């Protein structure tokens, strides 16, 4: 069964450093999403992406964040200058064209900012 | 605003039935989802309701009343492996808005 994959599974970085989290969505999916979950808290929407542009973003997704689809398979989330409070699990999700009702989540990347 | 409420924690016994409630107030509504999440893992899709009524899928059923802003997830014949967090989420303008999740503990 096809699945969303994410790399790395765990990333440790120093405050102020840039990180890039990578996702490979399911191959025929056209809608892509990033969510985050701070330990012990709820899953929070960051951004949705369709047709090579952001379709919606939350208040969390400020100028420090950016997303890109550099090629036909990868979908990346970049945090330019990490802060301690960026420590969280970051989940990528994707959904089929015309079936945005079901989003399939990747296993997540645990980001730890020291 | 966006507000999704569900109980923080519930306990139940193996073999029993448990109902996890969710109430919501969101600025848009395209459907309601239930996800299961084990500690340290990603949410996995359980069910989706867009029309009022009950959707049954094996041991899991989900109910929706849009007029009341209310849903529940019903788990039957509980198994130890059902111990997890259960997340209620509303699709609002192509994004999922999650509740804080209900941690279910199933005991022998």
Image (spheres, grey):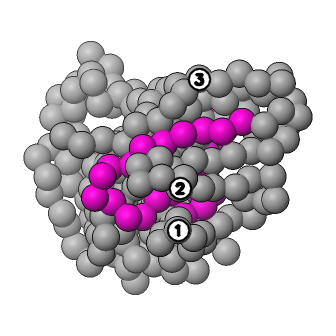
Instruction: Indicate yes or no whether the magenta region holds residue A24.
Output: yes
Q: In the image, which is nearer the foreground, mark 2 or mark 3? A: 2
Q: Give me the C-alpha separation between circle 2 and circle 3.
A: 21 Å
Seen in the image, is B18 located left or right of residue B57?
Answer: right
Q: Which residue is mark 1?
A: A52
Helix, strand or loop for disc 2: loop
- Disc 3: CA contacts within 10 A as few (<14), some (14-19) or many (>=20): some
- Of residues A34 and B4, which is closer to you in this image? A34
**Can you say whether B17 is above or below B95 in the image?**
above
Q: Residue furthest bottom?
A: B67
Q: Indicate the quadrant containing the N terminus of chain A: top left, top right, bottom left or bottom right.
A: top left
Q: Which residues are magenta?
A: A19-48
Does the residue at mark 2 contact the one at mark 3 (Cβ under 8 Å)?
no
Residue A49 pos. (x, y %) = 53, 65
The residue shown at (54%, 40%) is A22
Q: Which mark is residue A10?
A: 3
Q: Nearer the viewer, residue A35 or B90?
A: A35
**Is there CB contact under 8 Å for labels 1 and 3?**
no
Residue A43, given in percent of the width and then of the height, sits at 57, 48
């Amino acid at each position: 069964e096809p699945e969303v994959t994410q790399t790395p599974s765990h990333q440790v970085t120093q405050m102020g450093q840039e990180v890039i989290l990578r996702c490979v969505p399911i191959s025929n999916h056209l809608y892509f999403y990033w969510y985050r979950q701070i330990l012990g808290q709820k899953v929070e929407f960051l951004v949705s992406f369709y047709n090579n542009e952001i379709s919606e973003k939350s208040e969390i997704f400020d100028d420090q964040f950016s997303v890109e689809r550099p090629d036909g398979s990868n979908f990346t989330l970049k945090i330019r200058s990490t802060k301690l409070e960026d420590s969280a699990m970051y989940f990528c999700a994707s959904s089929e064209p015309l079936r945005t009702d079901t989003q399939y989540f990747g296993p997540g990347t645990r980001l730890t900012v020291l | 605003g966006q507000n999704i409420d569900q109980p923080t924690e519930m306990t139940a016994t193996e073999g029993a039935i448990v109902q996890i409630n969710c109430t919501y107030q969101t600025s848009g509504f395209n459907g309601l989802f239930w996800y299961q999440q084990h500690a340290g893992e990603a949410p996995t899709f359980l069910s989706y309701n867009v029309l009022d009524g009950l959707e049954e899928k094996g041991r899991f059923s989900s109910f929706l009343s849009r007029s009341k802003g209310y849903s529940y997830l019903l788990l039957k014949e509980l198994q130890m492996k059902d111990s997890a967090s259960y997340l209620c989420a509303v699709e609002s303008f192509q994004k999922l808005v999650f509740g804080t999740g209900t941690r279910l503990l199933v005991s022998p």
